[in-house]
Amino acid sequence: MTQVTVKELAQTVNTPVERLLQQMREAGLSHSSADQVVTDTEKQKLLSHLKGNTKLDEPRKITLQRKTQTTLKVSGSKTVNVEVRKKKTYVKQSPDELATEQQRELEAQREAEEAARLKAEEEARQRAEEEIRLKAEEEARLKAEEEARQQAAAKAAQEVAEAAAKAATETKPEEVVEEVVANKAAPAAPAAASDERKREEPRRPVAPPVAGKRDEDERRDRKHAQHRPSLKEKDKVSSPRVVRSAGDDEDDGFGGRRGGRNKSKLKKRNQHGFQNPTGPVVREVALGETITVAELAQQMSVKAAEVIKFMFKMGSPATINQVLDRETAQLVAEELGHKVKLVSENALEEQLAESLKFEGEQVHRAPVVTVMGHVDHGKTSLLDYIRRAKVAAGEAGGITQHIGAYHVNTDRGMVTFLDTPGHAAFTAMRARGAQATDIVILVVAADDGVMPQTEEAIQHAKAAGVPIVVAVNKIDKPDADPDRVKHDLAGRDVIPEEWGGDTQFVHVSAKAGTGVDELLEAILLQAEVLELTATPSAPGRGVVIESRLDKGRGPVATVLVQNGTLRQGDMALVGVNFGRIRAMLDENGKPIKEAGPSIPVEILGLDGTPDAGDELTVLTDEKKAREVALFRQGKFREVKLARAQAGKLENIFENMGQDEKKTLNIVLKSDVRGSLEALQSSLSGLGNDEVQVRVVAGGVGGITESDANLALASNAVLFGFNVRADAGARKIIEQEGLDLRYYNVIYDIIEDVKKALTGMLGSDVRENILGIAEVRDVFRSPKFGAVAGCMVVEGMVHRNRPIRVLREDIVIFEGELESLRRFKDDVAEVRAGMECGIGVKSYNDVKVGDKIEVFEKVEVARSL
Ligand code: GDP
């Protein structure tokens, strides 16, 4: 064993001499200088001392090395030395560390407890603050209300005085007085049903704070009392209120807690106070066909959350905007202790329909005509020619403005033109249930023949059941071939009269004006066959063709009078709008006092801009008009929701109607004519004695707005075979909840339709479009081939999902992505609004303007 000095040892263990000496002294050794010798025994002593005391000095990581050497004899005389080195490293966990571990756990536990405690404290503090805030708000509100009350009292007094003065000069004094009274105070006795409703409505609190609501009642009572002191007692008696004692401190039954202390303070401050009911208040809940959770809660004066909670307990979880059917709503209301009154949802509309009478002498009315046809075939030219030649002739100053419709007088009678060429306007109106057109003029250029939009026009007219008169246009052109047009149309079931059909063909030139008179004559002849009549002595009824908000004149609507006579000063109800007709202008912008059947007019005075296709009715009573308009506004959303459900392919079987043969209507668009024809014939052959399929419209190309409107109008399902809906179409589909299905296998369409027909559409694999990227630029990369520089325009593009390449909404490739990159990085997904580079696997013909659609397939269970 070697002996070392303290200094040497210090060097070996890498510790300063002083510190080592100190440690040695602590270990009970007597060394005091660096040169003293340390024996092995002393080293052991020191080591065991250090082990015991300074655990930190103990090696944490120990590496063991063992070296063995053996000698191998190779081929007699040669020897080879073999050295085997073994090395093992292990990390030792000192008891200290173990202890620390435990300590850490304990610490964490303590911390968690502490955090929970702090959180609870914080919550308690927030609650307290909230209470204080509410209290303060309550007080402020009461104060403000008291002030408002005083002001209102003064104002109301003044108004009543004014009204009385006015009443004396008005022709109908009772009505005015009643109006004022109805606005300022609840009438003593309901004069009419509508009065009753009006008075009921404000009694329903908007939100649960019952106290605030009661206060409002009270305020009204008081206001009432101030003006009609004699009614004060009566009103008080009739108010269903129960006074609570000041010490009463429980839940008021409406989810609100009001402390007695708080309340007595309030009482002191404001003698009127608010009084809480001691027991639950039983409300009468008026239930129509449907009601949302929020509305139901409102009618019961409870929080929507209460209803949701209750429904959850009942086992049917609901959301605040969920529409409940009448049975469910009734169950909930009754279980919560309220009474239910079932009302017919459409009582108002029914009353309205009954009140409108069209009695009187029926006379002939002019036909209303829409011009349709392929683009550039001369629709506008024809409309313009007729307008110029026939309308402007007698008008001083000519045409001052364009209102979307005009009428012409001929020797044989009047014809009204809807000056909105294009199928979209026609179908959009029909989609809203309005049939404004009696006859369609189908314009076909003789030099161009039947084109896709010509076919579309035929489909639209046929779907609407409107007869067609064909105007074979551009007959002046040298290459005009009217016979080909005749032939082509006959092939599409538009058969000329001379061939035994019922369609008149007239050769015209919109440019030269040839044949226009004959065309008008043909229209009038067709009109005679239709025997169009109206009752001019009845109140006016019409349909909105277009409307706009005019800066100076407010809402302006172009209306086609369809029956009766519309007069200036009439009270008009138009869709969800209403108003007294302040002024009426004819198609030349001249003021007129009245307009009879088939006359287009512009009306001013509505409270908003109605939609094209909205119906106009004239009512005698403004209150009624307002009431129905408001009712319709509320109904509007629900109708849309209901329609969204009814239009689904899954539900189509149930909604096909009970009468005669049930029909499944389909609007079908396809990428190529071949597949379109194959689909049309196989689908049409699918029916039996009870059910049938009707392809309302079929065409080549993407799904357009006009297709969507047609589907809406004819309650059809939209099928896209290798084609997609454009943005306009998608908007309508989404808004109206239409059923749009994309397919790429003919067999799949046929299977789905078969299943729908047998009511067996089970679970359904449907495609979800996850994102769409638009190709803005194409680069060539040696590694990936063509790389499309894209902008993600919708949703999100995912790296690992199937894709399709679309050109003009037609599918041209289906496959997967090779690469998805943002700048230089490979990414898994890119969201809308960002640019990216896309490489499509085994497809190199991407072009600028193409769309890359990323989709997924999901299984959707059939919903009933
Ligand atoms: P729309 O797209 O169907 O409304 O078609 P337009 O009325 O805009 O007409 C398209 C083009 O055809 C215009 O350049 C017209 O001048 C021309 N056009 C329209 N009708 C006739 C016609 O009867 N004869 C000739 N030669 N050209 C016509």
Image (cartoon, rainbow, N blue to C red):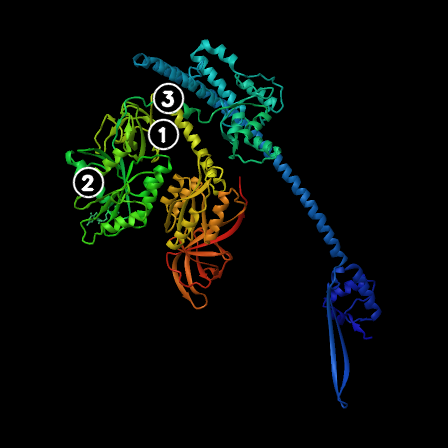
Q: Amino acid at mark 2?
A: Glu
**Mark 3 lies on residue:** 355
**Residue name at image x 49 percent, y 46 percent:** 754
Of all residues shown, which one is farthest toward the right?
A: 41
- Residue 232 image offset from top left, x and y in percent: 48, 11
Toward the bottom, the furthest residue is 77
C-alpha span from label 2 to label 3: 43 Å
* Residue at x 42%, y 20% (from the top left corner): 194
Q: Residues within 10 Å of mark 1 (few under 14, many from 20)?
A: many
Q: Give the residue type that dot 3 points to.
A: Ser
Sequence order check, earlier mark of 1 and 2 = 2
Residue 831 seen = no
- Of circles 1 and 3, the one toward us is 3
The kind of secondary structure element at disc 3 is: helix
Residue at mark 1 to residue at mark 3: CA–CA distance = 19 Å
Q: Which residue is outermost to the front?
A: 500
In front of the other: 589 or 491: 491
Name the residue at the top extreme.
Answer: 230
Q: Earlier in the sequence, mark 2 or mark 3?
A: 3
Task: Name which residue lies at 61% across and 25% down.
Answer: 251
Q: Which residue is mark 1?
A: 577
Q: Mark 2 highlights which residue? A: 518
Of 97 and 236, nearer the camera is 236
Instruction: Return the disc, 1 or 3, that comes first in the chain's sequence.
Output: 3
10 Å neighbourhood of mark 3: few (<14), some, or many (≥20)? few
Q: Position of residue 51 (x, y in %)?
A: 79, 62
Tell me the quarter of the image containing the N terminus: bottom right
